[in-house]
Amino acid sequence: MKKLGALLLAAALVMSMIACGGGNKNTGEGTAAPAGESSTNAGTKAGTKAGESGGEKTLNVGTINVLGTFMPGSENEVCHWGCYLVYDYLFYYDEDNNPFSDILKEWHYEEDGTTFVMECRDDVYFANGDQMTGDDVLFSIKTLVDRETNQAAYYATVDWDKSYVSEDGFTVYLANTQEFGPGIINMGVVYLLDQSWCEETGFDNIDPWLNAPNGSGPYEVAEYVTDSYVTLKRRDSYWGEFTGADTVKINHYAEDSAMYMALETGEIDLALNIAESDYSRALTDDKIAVMTTHEGENILLALDNNNQYMKDENVRLAIAYGVNWQDVAESARGELAEVPGSIITSVSPYYKDTGVYEYDLEKAKQYMEAAGYVTDGSTVNFTLNMTTVDQAVKTNAATVIQFYLQQLGINLQMNFTDFPTAFSAWLTEGGTDLNFQDSDTGSVCGEPYISLRFFPAELATFPFAAISDETFVTLYKEANYTTDDDVRKEKYAELQQYVHDRAMIIPLYESVDAVAYNPEKIESVSLHSAVSANLRYVILK
């Protein structure tokens, strides 16, 4: 069933789009259904059929993201812009944040809510000619866990022993130890892998994952120059419909300013996630178009609730009221700064505005004194540590926080480093006391199951984020492990207020991204709250 010859593959190609869980704009439909009912995807993207030629068009893109491999879970995984082109995903999300899928014919919960059923299409093929089956879908999800990726926490309650694929090979039964709830659909970035190819290739040999990843998406790698660019060309054997350029070249720039200059000079057609200063410039440049979108995530300040100092609620509240969070947001995001009113993003249907912590130094000092510390302006009460990635957006914000904490007698020691080093520190017990926590970068439109997954102690990926508070954990479970949406909204509202009142997690800024492009070259750019631009759907003139 797996291997097909080129002629058979060409005959079997069907014109529909593909799947995903990273969040992309599309016109397909599909919503989570109550237990026992079905959800279907009825929409496809208009585009060029596989093998047709409408004139060669190249899209030149700029990014400051590191161009790594296409291997899931690697420390140097390629930026998701490239992955969207090479791989299909389990779920996408429409403009209303409803999930839909192009590789699934339908999905539903079984009546007890503990099994999530996914019926796969039988006309999806990988680049090497392998047919995608339910085994590949289940393998792709399980790989995220086995490789201990940052997506593994999504599946902490999956019962793998009871999960299986139907005899015909196209229906996946994903079992859980408790009721799933709608959040299981928002499974983060699950890009679909060819099980047999992965088992043959292995995960130790980097080269195939770098230069010839075997995805089912519309593009394949044509040329890869380390730390410089990757060129992708659409493949003739693609099973679905093409929508974008014939060739996409993703160029890496070390500095934001260099990327923006490349846009100005015509070296690139589109600049992804431009810096705040460049956003201001683009607004006044009639030769450049700029678009903004909420990514569907908040940047949060994770306070280690198990730290000997911050386990005291008074200390956490002192930090909450002793820092001007508007200053922090503006230092990080400039004109794009938005201080959120909750730990859940405002684009989420479960958002509750619990209010922003208004800067009040006297109030903060009162909390510190209630905790038994002095606030005479010269005494250092204790030291906290922070390790974060050496990026301006993070270093600027951390420096502002450090300044304000000094007024409370809290010494914040900071370590700015590269991502692999920071990631290692985050995984180390007691590795950091404070940390920036993306609620879920480029993933799923503010679905709370995802954005808060780091924090319940039994699910927490990083030690500093683990919260053992019984009420917090209970509310999280009650909100997530139910298919009753009214119950979810009620429990999430309680959870948000509970966290706010105790300063267990502090929202820093809502992630708003800006994309700049050349309107003379590009006809349209599809934006969505979970990803700033899906390069599949950038339409050239």
Image (cartoon, rainbow, N blue to C red):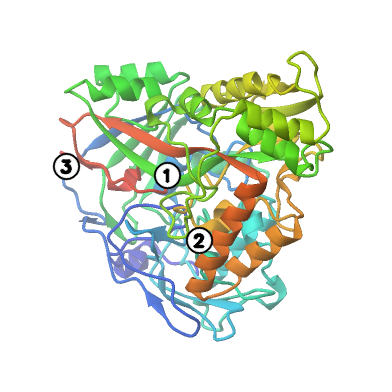
Which residue corresponds to the image point at 47% horizontal and 54% vertical from the top-left? 444
Foreground residue among 276 and 468: 468
Mark 3 or 2 closer to N-term?
3
Q: Which mark is residue 90?
A: none
Residue contact at pointers 1 and 2, CB within 8 angstroms: no
The crowding category of the residue bearing disc 1, from other C-alpha atoms within 10 Å (few below 14, some 14 to 19, many at least 20), is many
Which residue corresponds to the image point at 61% horizontal and 52% vertical from the top-left? 151
435 up-or-down from 47: above or below: above
The residue that mark 1 highlights is: 295
Q: Nearer the viewer, mark 3 or mark 2?
A: 2
The residue that mark 2 highlights is: 186
Foreground residue among 280 and 355: 355
On the rendered image, what quadrant is the C terminus found in? top left
483 up-or-down from 20: above or below: below
Q: Amino acid at mark 1?
A: Glu
Mark 1 or 3 closer to N-term?
3
The crowding category of the residue bearing disc 3, from other C-alpha atoms within 10 Å (few below 14, some 14 to 19, many at least 20), is few
Q: In the rendering, at what x and y percent does residue 94 appear?
A: 34, 58
Under circle 2, the secondary element is loop
Which residue corresponds to the image point at 40% horizontal and 54% vertical from the top-left? 217
Q: Which mark is residue 55?
A: 3
Residue contact at pointers 1 and 3, CB within 8 angstroms: no
Q: CA distance from mark 1 to mark 2?
A: 15 Å
Tell me if I can see residue 80 in this picture: yes
Q: Amino acid at mark 3?
A: Gly
